[in-house]
Image (cartoon, coloured by chain):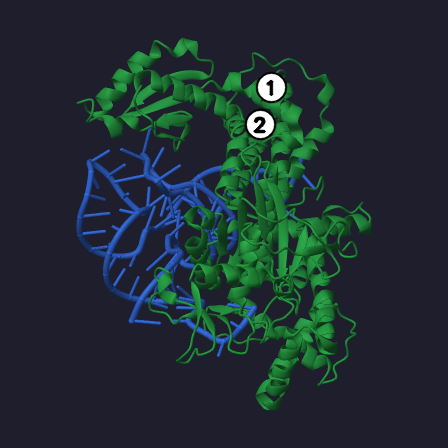
RNA sequence: GGGCCCAUAGCUUAGCAGGAUAGAGCGCUGGCCUUCGGAGCCAGCGACAUGGGUUCGAAUCCCAUUGGGCCCGCCA
């Protein structure tokens, strides 16, 4: 946080000259040669002052130089080609920074930007008919990292999983277990069994025997009415699969507070409430003619940019509701716009303190009515999400609609090489995963494979460790590698998965981050932290200054990543910090240095270690002490 | 046909509310183990899709073109 002291001073001193300018155009310069902060204000306002930018800069510098003595952390001001460059007194900042870090430790970097804000974060949301694949994992890692960041910045965060226990994919499984007589029990995990074997098998049979599709329709109806043995079986399957999915999330380090079952959106009248509201506002109506006769629809022309599309069906002619309709009811609940409430009960059998919606539960309002509702959903659903948001805006205004965030990300696809590893011969460079066709990588399988590679390395490097220790370490390293790989790529970009390419254990990777952290731990283990000498008069070298500056900015980076909802910003910061530390490590000895350098460097390494650990925790990477 | 997203070295990418020399990793070439852990470091090669526009200044903003992905169902 100490960087902000410097920044405040720079703003203050600049205002001495530019009394009436609100924007100071401060930025972090591309090189240390230009100081720690620079302002381009002279370019912007030169005209107003009737001068050329550089003339103005020189004049400003001259005047501000007279005031510089009153400021603690500004060492020097420079006017260069129109820029005003401000140099931080790193020597003064360094002790403050190190003290703050060693005092706050795992609290270092926290801020209050979220104080009093209730935020719902919904992620994963996989259909409960299969094991999670790496596409879901991107969703889970983004959502979980957001949750960690927002908690750290003092938001009141509630994490949700929205599970569709009614969709047609459930009918496929029920069909497989009843009509086709497939066994419910298997040697492999239930989610994997359902997805890899039952679901794929049933879908392949539809082509050969179309009469099965009629059976499927019957099952869908029965599930939809939520009564009878078929519906009960469907729910049982969904429950068992979801339980396994949540285990996979836990393995990735992600946990939930609430499971909201999609069928309960209807059961607890969330849908009805929303439809009533939309009815009253005249936003929906029942179609009386044409191809949508008998459906309750929303006019496409009310949604900007969607004028050319057909109207959207909310209630089908047979009275059942579409996904969009339920999502509207659900969104109204999230934002506190509904009179209906879910009832909840505990599911401690899945995770301690986890709640699920249930007819046997009780009303609990702790998640109802959020200040911000973030739904992590892939980009293919942008259209529906836009309609949903437009509906909220039409019904309640822009301000309310802005509380609803479709946190979009592009899907994970497979490289042709990865696809061929699954026995799928690709005719293009990119192959989209398909649960139906069995073209996907399960998260647990990928982690296991990665873990094996890491284990082999560990056995070689750490011959003295027990099997349990090796196993524990390789698990942590594997999870960190996967999370890093999934968070590293900009969420607007298609992530092309390739085992060798994506899950590197060398270079720019999660493993590199852990390795760097281990290096800091290695030094600290050998250092005697109690016998440090005074380094008040120590003058930092270039690498040390850089590191101190980086450390002093951590809080700002965290706050920025949280408010921009971009965990990737923190990831890049963390990697940069590792790069700088490794350069420092190769160049300067710590334990064998002379005093006071030695004492200073030990404290510096300790601080780097703390900040790296905090960064890793915020991104769900798992720090280890040896590897 | 309409809409959304993407385009930076051979490959994977960072930088994008305009700002100084476009930063990494993989690969390739050549170095660094008597030195705190070589899953590391150092050096070299190598990039802003194309064409316009706005601006003192454009990888960044705007328009067009090209190429790639996605979406447009009484599926979710």
At a point 42% along the width and 9% down the height, the residue shown is: A70
> What label does residue A597 carry, if any?
1
Q: Residues within 10 Å of mark 1 (few under 14, many from 20)?
A: many
Is there a contact, CB below 8 Å, between mark 2 and mark 1? yes
Image coords of residue A314 (percent x, y): 49, 69
Is A238 placed left or right of A322 in the picture? Answer: right
Asked if badge 2 and badge 1 are on a common chain, one would say yes
Q: Is any atom of residue A217 visible in this view?
A: yes
**Gap in angstroms between the C-alphas marked 2 and 1:** 10 Å
Is B43 placed left or right of A18 in the picture? Answer: right
Image coords of residue A149 (percent x, y): 58, 41
> What label does residue A523 carry, if any?
none
- Of the two numbered discs 2 and 1 on the same chain, state the one appearing first in sequence: 2
Is B62 placed left or right of A379 in the picture? Answer: left
Location of residue A212 with respect to A324 vertically, above or below:
below
Quarter the N terminus of chain A occupies: top right
Q: How many marks?
A: 2
For chain A, the rendered hue is green
Chain for numbered disc 1: A
């Amino acid at each position: 946080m100490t960087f902000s002291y410097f920044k405040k001073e720079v703003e203050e001193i600049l205002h001495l000259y530019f009394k009436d300018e609100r924007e100071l155009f401060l930025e972090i310069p591309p090189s240390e040669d230009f100081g720690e902060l620079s302002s381009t204000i002279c370019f912007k306002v030169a005209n107003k002052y009737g001068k050329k930018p550089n003339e103005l800069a020189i004049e400003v510098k001259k005047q501000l130089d007279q005031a510089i003595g009153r400021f603690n952390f500004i060492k020097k001001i420079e006017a260069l080609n129109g820029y005003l460059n401000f140099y931080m007194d790193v020597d003064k900042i360094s002790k403050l920074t190190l003290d703050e870090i060693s005092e706050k430790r795992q609290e270092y970097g926290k801020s209050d930007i979220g104080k009093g804000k209730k935020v719902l974060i919904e992620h994963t949301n996989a259909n409960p008919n299969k094991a999670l694949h790496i596409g879901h994992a991107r969703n889970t890692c983004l959502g979980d990292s957001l949750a960690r960041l927002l908690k750290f910045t003092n938001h009141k965060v509630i994490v949700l999983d929205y599970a569709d226990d009614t969709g047609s994919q459930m009918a496929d499984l029920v069909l497989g277990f009843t009509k086709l007589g497939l066994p419910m029990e298997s040697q492999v995990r239930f989610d994997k069994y359902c997805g890899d074997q039952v679901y794929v098998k049933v879908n392949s049979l539809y082509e050969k025997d179309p009469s099965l599709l009629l059976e499927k329709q019957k099952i869908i109806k029965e599930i939809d009415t939520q009564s009878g043995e078929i519906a009960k079986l469907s729910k049982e399957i969904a429950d068992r699969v979801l339980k396994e999915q949540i285990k996979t999330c836990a393995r990735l380090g992600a946990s939930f507070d609430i499971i909201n079952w999609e069928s309960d959106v209807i059961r607890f009248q969330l849908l009805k409430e929303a439809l009533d509201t939309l009815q009253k506002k005249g936003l929906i109506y029942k179609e009386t003619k044409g191809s949508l006769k008998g459906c309750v629809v929303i006019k496409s022309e009310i949604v900007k940019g969607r004028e050319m599309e057909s109207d959207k069906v909310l209630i089908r002619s047979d009275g059942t509701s579409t996904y969009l309709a339920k999502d509207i009811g659900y969104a109204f609940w999230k934002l506190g716009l509904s009179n209906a409430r879910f009832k909840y009960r505990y599911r401690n059998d899945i995770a301690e303190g986890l709640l699920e919606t249930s007819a046997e539960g009780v009303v609990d309002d702790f998640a109802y009515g959020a200040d911000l509702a973030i739904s992590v959903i892939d980009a293919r659903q942008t259209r529906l999400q836009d309609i949903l948001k437009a509906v909220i805006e039409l019904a309640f205004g822009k301000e309310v609609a802005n509380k609803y965030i479709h946190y979009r990300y592009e899907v994970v696809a497979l490289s042709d090489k990865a696809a061929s590893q699954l026995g799928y011969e690709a005719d293009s460079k990119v192959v989209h995963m398909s649960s139906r066709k069995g073209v996907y990588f399960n998260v647990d399988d990928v982690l296991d494979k990665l873990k094996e590679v890491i284990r082999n390395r560990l056995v070689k490097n750490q011959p003295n460790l027990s099997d349990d220790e090796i196993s524990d370490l390789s698990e942590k390293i594997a999870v960190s590698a996967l999370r890093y790989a999934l968070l590293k790529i900009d969420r607007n970009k298609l992530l092309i998965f390739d085992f060798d390419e994506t899950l590197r254990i060398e270079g720019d990777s999660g493993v590199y981050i852990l390795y760097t952290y281990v290096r800091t731990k290695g030094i600290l283990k050998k250092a005697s932290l109690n016998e440090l000498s005074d380094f008040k008069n120590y003058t930092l070298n270039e690498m040390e200054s850089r590191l101190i500056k980086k450390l002093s900015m951590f809080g700002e980076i965290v706050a920025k990543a949280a408010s921009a909802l971009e965990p990737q910003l923190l990831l890049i910061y963390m990697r940069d910090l590792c790069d700088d530390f490794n350069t420092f490590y190769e160049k300067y000895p710590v334990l064998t240095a002379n005093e006071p350098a030695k004492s200073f460097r030990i404290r510096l390494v300790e601080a780097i270690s703390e900040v790296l650990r905090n960064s890793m925790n915020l991104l769900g990477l798992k720090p280890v002490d040896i590897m």
